[in-house]
Image (cartoon, helix red, strand yellow):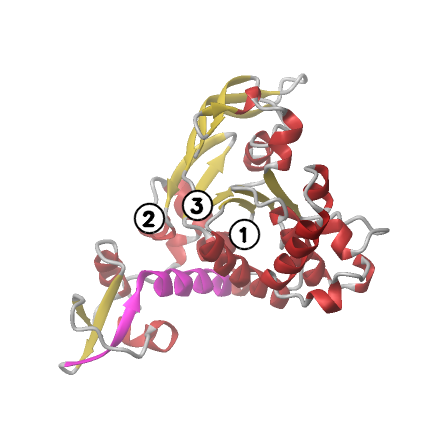
Amino acid sequence: MIKFSDVSKQYADGTKALTSLDLQIEDGEFFVLIGPSGCGKTTTLKMMNRLIDPSSGVISMDEKEIASYDIHELRWDIGYVLQQIALFPHMTIEENIAIVPELKKWDKKKVQSRVDELLEMVGLDPLVYKNRKPDELSGGQQQRVGVARALAADPQVILMDEPFSALDPISREKLQDDVVELQQRIKKTIVFVTHDMQEALKIGDRICIMKEGRVVQVGTPHDILHNPVNEFVKEFVGINTLPTDEVNLEQLMDHTLEQKVDKSLSIISTPSSLKKVLAALAQEDELSVEKDGEIIGILSRQKIVQYMADNMQERGENHE
């Protein structure tokens, strides 16, 4: 668990980056920091591995203040993935991934085995890629290597600072899917900074929306969409543009329905509005969908959140 207790940061020129930040990130969760430019999200991220130190307050990891850790050991034990992939161009992919294990004096055979394991984990064939140099890889492949390098010494925490924002849309969407799937398998704590609300809704177990160095709301994607705490969150998320009263379940089925039957679930009928669907999914993760007296499939909270995120993006593009 990572905990911020009354943490503030003020720079020498008087700029306040964070004010009285209280935040708790649970073990094994995918936690997303998002907000307008300059809101303090990257500062918050960088405080976790002491790239930036707070002016006041306490940050702890597993109930131990991070200020008491040896700074080199702390950083070795926290994976870090940047937007600028920052692979060493003169090193092979294998050498790039092996840096931290070698600093920690792992046995050579263990390092080689770990490199192969990680490349396979991120979808790159070790026999094909480990002896290549970074400039022989595409941007998406390089970012996969960046993820592998962050995982190399088996850290419990991975920090990711807008890691996919420089990629083309297809590579970005594929990496989002793959990182979510990877996190579900390896159960690491991932703290992810993004400026893209659709990305946050898609990948986050919980989302922290920030403004002017303060936390405005923390919640699941469903919480954020269904129960925004104020007008800022509504406007930032774009929830005022979502047609929750006009859209009904019949119109959503092509995008959201899973073709299977589970009679143990609560039932909702196809004429129901999106607003009613959201209210029902606030209580349960999945619902059976009924049409003309027959159960035709299952609707999940995750599918609805993804639909709403996609809907937001389309409306934003049309508005532009």
The N terminus lies in quadrant: top left
The mark that comes first in sequence, 3 or 2, is: 3
Q: What is the x, y in percent for residue 80?
A: 63, 42
Could you tell me the amino acid type at mark 3? Answer: Gly
Neighbours of disc 2 within 10 Å: few (<14), some (14-19), many (20+): some
For label 2, the residue is: 223
Q: What residue is shown at x 21% (from left), y 54% (from top)? A: 283
82 left or right of 298 in image: right
**Farthest residue in the right direction?**
90
- Contact between labelled residues 1 and 2, with CB atoms less than 8 Å apart: no
Residue 307 colored in magenta in the image: yes
How far from the left and from the top, in percent, is residue 303?
37, 65
Residue type for callout 1: Asp
In the image, taking residue 245 as reference, residue 105 lies left or right, namely: right
Report which residue position mark 3 lands on. Answer: 28
Query: In which quarter of the view is residue 296 placed?
Result: bottom left
- Residue at image position (68%, 68%) is 125
Please give the residue where the numbered disc 1 appears in the rendered image. 196
- Secondary structure at badge 3 equals loop
Image vertical order of residue 130 relative to residue 34, above or below: below
